[in-house]
Image: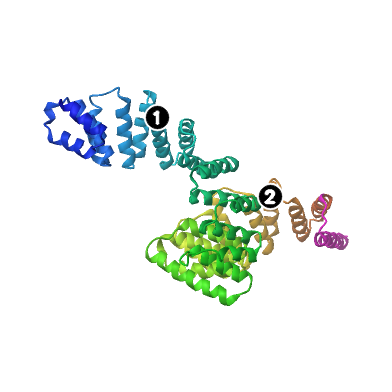
Amino acid sequence: MKYKEKFQKLVDDECYEEAWLFLYQYDIYKFEDSFYFSNMGWILNQLQRYLEASFYLSEGLKYYHDEAWLFAQYAFSLSKLKRYTEAIPFFKRAIIMGMQETWIYIELGTCYLETKDIDSALIYFEDALLDDPNNSWLLQQCAHIYENQQSFEQALEYYHKSFFLSYDDTILEDYIYLLIFLNRYDTAYQFLINCEMNNITYLLLAEICLYIKEYEEGLSYLSKIHDSNNLLYHLLSSQYYYLLDRVDEMNEHLDISFQLLNEIIKDNKFHLTFMKDFFLILEKTKGNFLKLQILDKMECLVDYKMWLYEEYIKTYSDIHMYKDAIIYCERYLNEFNNTKYVLDYYAWNLRLECRNHEAIDILLKRIDFFEVDAWIINELARNYTDIEDFKNAIYYYEELISYDIDHLHCFTSLAWAYFKIENYTLALSYLDKAKNIGSKDDKILSYISELYACIYEGIKNVK
């Protein structure tokens, strides 16, 4: 049997180890160099020895300049070595040369996904779906991208189709969590009720019942779960018992949650995405007490310190513990780079603690780093009003008028500021504008009436 024929038979029989050994042991000079290098590279790809494969395939390309499959194989080895940027042009060359196979579109889409070129990744994944419309994995990837692009209806369509092709619980979770994010609780509930009941389904139903405040029903779903080591089960149970004021049962599940959380932390199996999802539930149901206890337990997670500080800042701010929120803002800014999120919370909490001059410094610093928006202009105006620097307050409130915001607040604030500097003409002008907007809030109407009285009294005193 000729050497090439023997090699081909080993390949046809999928005896890749034997085929590799046959090529390796046989003297290279008995083969054409092009045959040896290209086939050795292809075999090594099959054996997942990608570094060696990339060497042989690159050598093979020196002989074959018009072989699309060789470009594709070389690109494949590079992508498996996570050299995505290098792989992309070789995949595209293979496609241009006519090798338009589904797996190439998938690999090319994956390379773009890894290099954060989401739009290009979606193009090639969609191209792959034209050839393989029932590929559940592809549908899920496209759904993830559409969700990130906030094309939620398209994402829901793809998740839905992907799930019914695979019945994969991870896809079910993706689909349900997106429905929850869109506040489509009834749709999510009805969909789950018609699914096969298992631990995942019960957990998801229990989460939905938290949002719609059907606490007893939610607990009934949790009671059907047979997995005492499921962290989410115990965290959800803790939350339900907290909301129902059943303290002993809450503490029992909370203790188990902390034990499981410690094991996850110790084994380095912590899932940030999971905790973010769970904290979203706590925020919806005002479970800040439980959230703070969990954060305290997790503070040893050095790799997640930035995220933990952000959660502390948000939680302490939500429960009006402004001093504690400020402490974590300062810790964050001492250890990490400035972020709009933290600077905003820092300035907001400083104002609420009547530390207005410091708040103003932070807000001006924020302007140096990030874009100016209505929120920051309003905060500056409020801080200057609090310290009775009305000229600066007027400057920022008049800037605020150009934004699409609550003009009633703007006009009444400007009327007050002009009244304080005894410019009664402009004070009346802005108060008239506020009155013309109209309000059904008795407190606002009362405030406008009182301010009119103050202005007219000021005018009378001048005369």
Which x, y percent locates residue 212?
A: 66, 59
Residue at image location 21% in from the left, 26% down from the top: 34
Can residue 234 be found in the magenta stretch? no
- The amino acid marked with disc number 1 is Glu
> Which residue is at the far bottom?
248
Q: How many marks?
A: 2
Q: Is residue 440 magenta?
A: yes
* Label located before the other in sequence (1 or 2): 1
Q: Which residue does the numbered mark 1 point to in the structure image?
A: 101
Residue at 54% of width from left, 60% of height from top?
278
Question: Which callout, 1 or 2, points to the residue nearer the camera?
Answer: 1
Q: Which residues are magenta?
A: 437-463
**How many residues crowd mark 2 within 10 Å: few (<14), some (14–19), many (20+)?**
many
Marks 1 and 2, how far apart at CA: 56 Å
Q: Report the predominant secondary structure element of the magenta stretch.
A: helix
Q: Quadrant of residue 92?
A: top left
Q: Secondary structure at mark 2?
A: helix
Is there any visible trace of residue 299 in the rendered image?
no
Q: Amino acid at mark 2?
A: Leu
Q: Position of residue 26 (x, y in %)?
A: 12, 33
**Which numbered circle lies on residue 400?**
2
Would residue 451 be found to the left or right of residue 372 on screen? right
- Residue 173: which numbered mark, if any? none
Tell me which residue sits at (56%, 59%) in the image. Answer: 202
Q: Circle 1 — which element?
A: loop
